[in-house]
Amino acid sequence: MAKELPTIAANIKKYRDKLGISQDKLSKMAGVTLHTIAKIETGSTPDPRIETLRKIANALGVGVDDLIHK
């Protein structure tokens, strides 16, 4: 059975898909590495730093709260 992704991972993917952008594009928009985005989205980094989340949220046009909560 597949492990459920952390809420943050699922939300980042959801908002990224909604914008129709790749992980690579998001990483450039947010000013973080592609490796960081990939690790967060796969759940390898379940609790990213708040500063990283802030950058990702800004790039996606959402609030940090939108990434943290279901």
Image (cartoon, rainbow, N blue to C red):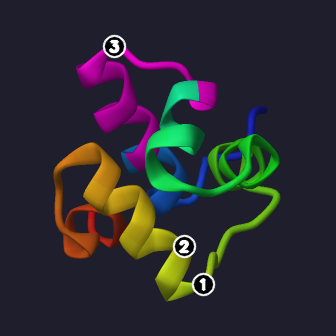
Q: Local crowd at mark 2 within 10 Å, few (<14), some, or many (≥20)?
A: some
Task: Specify the segment rendered in magenta.
Answer: 12-24
Confirm or deny contact between disc 3 and disc 2 (CB under 8 A): no
Q: Is 69 situated above or below 60?
A: below
Residue type marked 3:
Gly
With 59 as the anchor, is 40 left or right in this view?
right
The residue identified by callout 1 is 49
With 18 as the anchor, is 55 left or right in this view?
right
Residue reaching furthest to the top: 20
Q: Quadrant of the C terminus?
A: bottom left
Q: Is residue 14 magenta?
A: yes
Q: Main secondary structure of the magenta part?
A: helix
Q: Quadrant of residue 68?
A: bottom left
In terms of sequence position, does the residue under pointer 3 or pointer 2 come before the other? 3
Q: Residue at x 63, y 76 (%)?
A: 48
Q: Secondary structure at mark 2?
A: helix
Residue type marked 2:
Thr
The residue identified by callout 3 is 20
Q: Quadrant of residue 49?
A: bottom right
Q: Local crowd at mark 1 within 10 Å, few (<14), some, or many (≥20)?
A: few
Q: Quadrant of the N terminus?
A: top right
Residue type marked 1:
Arg
The residue identified by callout 2 is 52
